[in-house]
Image (cartoon, helix red, strand yellow):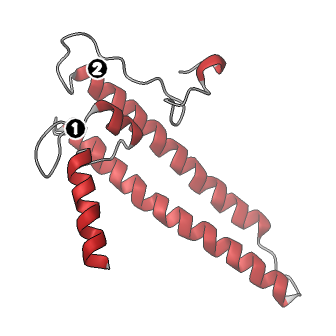
Amino acid sequence: MPTKANTNNGNLARGFEPYQEKKGEEYMSEPMRAHFTFLLNKWKLELMQEVDRTVHHMQDEAANFPDPADRASQEEEFSLELRARDRERKLIKKIDETLQLIEDNEYGWCDSCGVEIGIRRLEARPTATLCIDCKTLAEIKEKQIGS
């Protein structure tokens, strides 16, 4: 775990130490897979804790305000929280799928072209399934079709 001295380092996302590859180490070796399993499980735990906090917050804060504006404000706040939790629920499902890929030794390669996604990209987005080139092309195609 990072110390207080290095938690402000721009390379630390969600409070982890970047993986240090050893000279000659094979891509997606056992230590690398263990690193990403740790990251994904930690991320999943944080998301699940946030869900619990939301549930408790909504139970504690739920009130029947006599003023319609106050009721509307609270309902809008709860609606936004529930939308965020729904996105996080989908992300938890994606994390579980990614953990299964690690277990099946299929993690870290691009679904489109089959090349290595790269450790730094995976640390930035551990659930990534496309290399940066294929992701960029997919985004360009999406913009062209969407416009």
Which residue lies at the image location 27% right of the left edge and 63% below the top edge? 140
The tag on residue 52 is none
Along the line of sight, which residue is nearer the eye, 123 or 143?
A: 143
Residue 56: which quarter of the image? bottom right
Type of amino acid under label 1:
Gly
Image coordinates of residue 142 in percent, x first then y, are 27, 69
In three-dimensional space, the C-alpha distance between marks 2 and 1, rounded to whole angstroms, equals: 13 Å
Is 24 on the left or on the right of 17, as rendered?
left
Q: Secondary structure at mark 2?
A: helix
Image coordinates of residue 30 in percent, x first then y, are 23, 22
Is 4 on the left or on the right of 70, as rendered?
left
Q: Nearer the viewer, mark 2 or mark 1?
A: 1
Is 107 rendered above or below residue 64? above
Type of amino acid under label 2:
Pro
Q: Which residue is mark 2?
A: 31
Image coordinates of residue 49 in percent, x first then y, are 58, 48
Q: How many marks?
A: 2
Is tag 2's residue or tag 1's residue first in the polypeptide sequence? 2
Q: Secondary structure at mark 1?
A: loop
Is 54 rendered above or below residue 2? below
Label 2: few (<14), some (14–19) or many (≥20) C-alpha neighbours in 10 Å: some
Q: Which residue is mark 1?
A: 108
Image coordinates of residue 130 in percent, x first then y, are 23, 49
Which residue lies at the image location 38% right of the left edge and 35% below the top edge? 123
Is 115 rendered above or below residue 142? above
Is 41 on the left or on the right of 57, as rendered?
left
